[in-house]
Amino acid sequence: MINKYEIIETVQMINERHLDIRTITMGVSLLDCIGTTSKATARKVYDKVVRSAKDLVTTGDKIGEMYGVPIVNKRVSVTPISLIGASHLNYLDLACALDKAAAEIGVNFIGGYTALVQKGATAYETALIESIPEALSITKRVCSSVNVASTRAGINMNVICRLGEIIRRTAIATASESSIGCAKFVVFANAVEDNPFMAGAFHGVGEGDRIINVGVSGPGVVKTALESIPDGNLDDVCEIIKRTAFKVTRVGQLVAQTAAKMLDAQFGIVDLSLAPTPAAGDSVARILEEIGLEQVGGAGTTACLALLNDAVKKGGIMASSHVGGLSGAFIPVSEDIGMIEAADSGALSLEKLEAMTAVCSVGLDMIAIPGDTPAEIISAIIADEISIGVVNNKTTAVRLIPVIGKDVGEYVEFGGLLGHAPIMKVSKISPKKFISRGGRIAAPLHSNRN
């Protein structure tokens, strides 16, 4: 039972500690939109997205007013577009249709310009991948992702080799906007089909026709809770994080069920990730520092993050009938003021971030690097991070932004939730021979479980 003190505490979380619903994302299946031409398919895609999600934004606003909980983003994810356009290979028509639909219904992002190539790439998946730089340069709201590996399939190094150049082309195509196209593109290992967070959201083929997935947040809530036990031991720290995550996730469950009912859609999952923003008081890094670090990036950072991630999952999993998505702690550099400051001071390096991704929710996220970084180095960074996901049987991802015209020591400003970031140093030791070999890295031995 919820008592009056817990109600008061939840109100305080909302008013004083940055508790919010980070996103309501409607997943929409487009499998019934394949037409006889690319233009016909694009029309069907536009019509179905608008028809399905036309009330998403207004419904989210109504629920926010009803419960007094800020709902920051309303978004849409769709069936991987590589499948929908396979017959015609004109993916730019579909990208424009998605962008137009997103503008019409008022969402800030629409995800699903996606290819799943963990074991091999067909001609139609290759065509979508090659179209990514132009697609992200001519659209404002479209987000793209490519799944290049899984624990069961291994790692597709042929595609990873190509993606280094794709990312560079995307950076150049959007250079006038601080290479922001790369902020809308993510490379995955073990991508999940019900992720509500951008840029990696897509609507899996195993999902229903219309699904509501909700992503909760609240780093400020967790930090404030920890401030109440300045001398507690690590058992106390874990316990208070679990209790707080439970309460935050219950709010997400309520919002998700209400939204599904009002929109006549199926309730999918609650993603109980701690997702930061650049705002003061809304930082995952600050939680780690409250646990006991002088600054994120120093010795002990990975251990603190492992503790936090585990406690969040344990606390939240009992609070919702369906927990899914990514669920854990995000560490995007440009979107977290504590991470920004640590990177700026030199306390946080790319190498330390990679170590942290072995225990966090996703991976190397929103990291700005020099604009002249060679394609093979970008590919090698992706390969390193993807290997962590494959070997550890977890989702990992890479969202690197080579900012054209910028170098180490300079800053880039993306604005809004994407924040700003220092350009981080990248090792210039060449991996060219390794990357150019291509082929596949086999699945790890422990993937053979049947």
Image: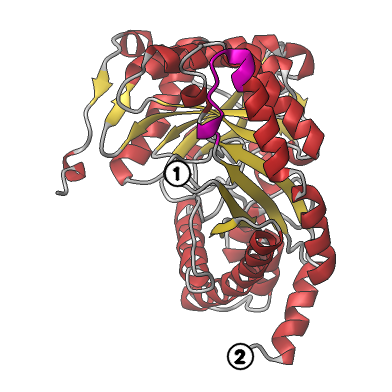
Residue 109 higher or lower than 393, as above or below: above
Amino acid type, callout 1: Val
Q: Position of residue 60 (x, y in %)?
A: 77, 56
Proximity of marks 1 and 2: CB atoms separated by less than 8 Å: no
Q: How far from the left and from the top, in percent, is residue 87?
A: 46, 15
For mark 1, does the 10 Å Cα neighbourhood hold few (<14), some (14 to 19), or many (20 or more) residues?
some
Q: How is the image coloured?
A: secondary structure
Q: Residue at x 49, y 61 (%)?
A: 323
Mark 1 lies on residue: 192
- The local crowd at label 2, few if under 14, some if 14 to 19, many if 20 or more residues have their Cα within 10 Å, is few
Mark 2, residue position:
1
Secondary structure of residue under mark 2: loop
Locate residue 23 relative to residue 301 in the image: left or right: right
Residue 415 in view, yes or no:
no
Give the residue furthest to the front: 36
Quick one: label 1 or label 2, which is nearer the N terminus? Answer: 2
Q: Which residues are magenta?
A: 30-41
Choose top left, top right, bottom left or bottom right for residue 422: top right
In which quadrant of the rendered view does residue 382 lie? top left
Measured as percent of width and height from the top left, residue 237 is found at 54, 73
Does 37 lie within the magenta span? yes
**Residue 332 rendering spot, x and y as whole percentages:** 61, 41
User: What's under tag 2, amino acid-wise?
Assistant: Met
Quadrant location of the N terminus in the rendered image:
bottom right
Quarter of the image where one finds residue 333? top right
Horizontal side of 138 relative to 15 (left or right) equals: left
